[in-house]
Amino acid sequence: MARKFEATGDFVERLEGTERRKAIPPLEIMERMGLDPSWSVLDIGAGVGYFSVPLSESVREVVALDVETRMLDVLQERAVSRKRKNIHALQGDVLAIPLMAESFDHVLLAFIYHEVNLPTLMLEECARVLKPGGCLTVVDFQKWETPFGPPVSERKAPAEVERRARKWFSLLAEFGEQVFYQLEFKKM
């Protein structure tokens, strides 16, 4: 990992604050994902459930993978309080996803691409766990200064993500916002 988000202090507020919600609207991002209610979705780097919780209202199952157990504890509390029985929290590493091959319809990498030192291996793992024809969504910070996020030097441009992904994926769509970009891929 290049820069792991630390689950210290009021990490929930940092991840879910009002300013962040305005700049990064989960429902708009999900709408672009073209979700199907029958799908099983893997949310990698799920944190406290910024995407996992709303995703659980639109798909059959969400597996929320994160390396940080403190964040997953918060996510599980949220799932219980919202009676979301289709969210399954799993502690694990994105470079060795502890799940069976071809078991998901969609994988979401939201604001984690810039944190991984071996992005090619991460993309290979995403391709491994996706069913044939499955989809991958990559959402990350623009490679310029924004009100929050990692230093610009750690961010990756959309073109770099697409270049690395093309071994396993074809790019379907690209969206650019002030704070983030969103890439939609299909597994080849």
Image (cartoon, rainbow, N blue to C red):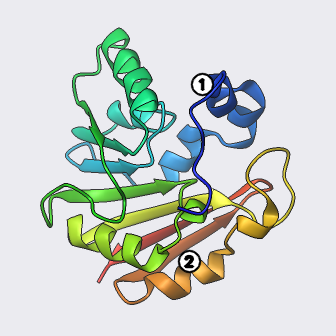
Does any portion of residue 30 appear in the rendered image? yes
Residue depicted at x 69% and y 30%: 14
User: Residue 32: x and y, percent?
Assistant: 51, 55
**Residue 98 x %, y %:** 20, 55
Q: Is residue 74 left or right of residue 155?
A: left
Considering only vertical position in the picture, is 100 above or below 147?
A: below
Q: Position of residue 129 (x, y in %)?
A: 22, 65
Rendered residue at 52%/65% (across/down): 116
Q: Quadrant of residue 187?
A: bottom left
CB under 8 Å between discs 1 and 2: no
Q: Which residue is mark 1?
A: 12
Q: Is residue 174 left or right of residue 53?
A: right
**In 3D space, how far apart are the residues under numbered discs 1 and 2 (Cα atoms)?**
28 Å
Which residue was labeled with disc 2?
Answer: 161
**Horizontal side, residue 157 vs residue 5: left or right:** right
> Considering only vertical position in the picture, is 132 above or below 167?
above
Please, what is the three-letter code of the amino acid marked with disc 1?
Val
